[in-house]
Amino acid sequence: MFGFLGTTEFSEGHPASENLKHCSHQLGVHPDYRNRSIGYRLKLAQRRAVLEQGLQLATWTYDPLLSLNGYFNVRRLGVVCNRYIRDAYGSMRDGLNVGLPSDRFDVDWWVDSSRVIERVEERSRLPELSDYQKQGAVVLNPAHRGEKGLVYPPDHFSSPENTLALVEIPSDFLRLKDIDFELAQVWKFQTREIFESAFAADYKVSDFLFTREREEPRSYYLLARSRAVEGER
C-alpha cells in the first residue's frame, strides 16, 4: 500500500497546509493471500494513519466497471463519488485495461464521517436494493441477459429524475470482456455517459449493491442527489 500527501484544491492566499488530504495511490495483495480481508484491514490501517495525521479526507481512483471494487470501496468503506475521469492513465496494456480507455472514478473517503464510521464499525444494517426501490429508485439502464450468459445494456438509458437512481453494471466485467470485447466497449461508453451526465446534474454515487435475480448475479450503483447523501463528512 502506497500513498502521499496532497491538497484538495488550490486557493490563492491560503497555504497548502489548510487543504491537505491523503492520496491513496496503490494497494495490492499477493494472489496467494487474497480473499482473506487483508485489503480491507490495510484500508482500516490507512484510515487510522490518516486520522493520526489530523486529516479528514483520503482520495483514490478505481475502474467503476469492476463490481468487486465497487462493493469494496463504496459499500464496505463508504466512499462517495461525483468525479469521472476519462482515460485517466492513458493507454494501458495490462489485462484489465488493454484496448479500453482507462476511465476511473475519483472517490472521496471522509474517514471521520458518520457514514464511514457506520460502515467500518458495522453499527447497523445497511439498506438493500428493495429498500432503495421502495424510496423510488429506478434502474436507469436495465440490462438483459443474452448469449453465453452475458448481460447486455439497453439501447437507450434514462436520466435520473428522483432523489435516488440505480445504474446497472456487469457483475463480472472481466469475463464479459474476454468473451465479447465489443460488448465491453458498449458498456464502457454507455456507463461513462450515464455517470458524467448524472454527476453534472448534482448526483453522487453513494452505495453499491449485489443481488440475485432468478439465480443470476446483478450489480448496481446507487446515485443520490448530493444533498441527500447523509453523514458524508
Image (cartoon, rainbow, N blue to C red):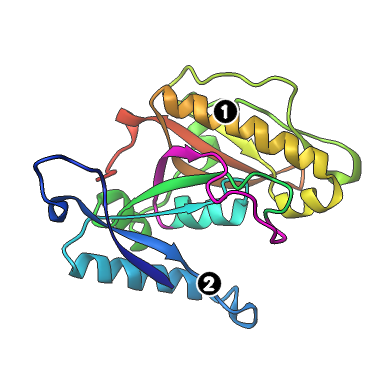
**Left or right relative to 158: residue 47:** left
Instruction: Decide whether residue 89 is among the magenta residues.
Output: yes
Looking at the rendered structure, the kind of residue marked 1 is Ile
Most foreground residue, 100 or 112: 100
Q: Secondary structure at mark 1?
A: helix
Magenta range is 77-96
Instruction: Decide whether residue 100 is among the magenta residues.
Output: no
**Left or right relative to 123: residue 35:** right
How many angstroms separate mark 1 from mark 2 (CA)? 29 Å
Q: Residue furthest right?
A: 147
Q: Secondary structure at mark 2?
A: loop
Where does residue 149 sit, x and y in percent of width and height?
85, 45
* Residue that carries the numbered disc 2 in the rendered image: 28
Quadrant for residue 118, please give it. bottom left
Going 64% across and 50% down the picture, which residue do you hit?
91
Answer above or below: position of 191 versus 232.
above
Going 55% across and 19% down the picture, which residue do you hit?
159
Instruction: Give the quadrant of the N terminus.
Output: bottom left
Where does residue 79 sit, x and y in percent of width and height?
39, 50
Looking at the rendered structure, the kind of residue marked 2 is Gly
**Left or right relative to 132: residue 179:** right
Q: Which mark is residue 194?
A: 1
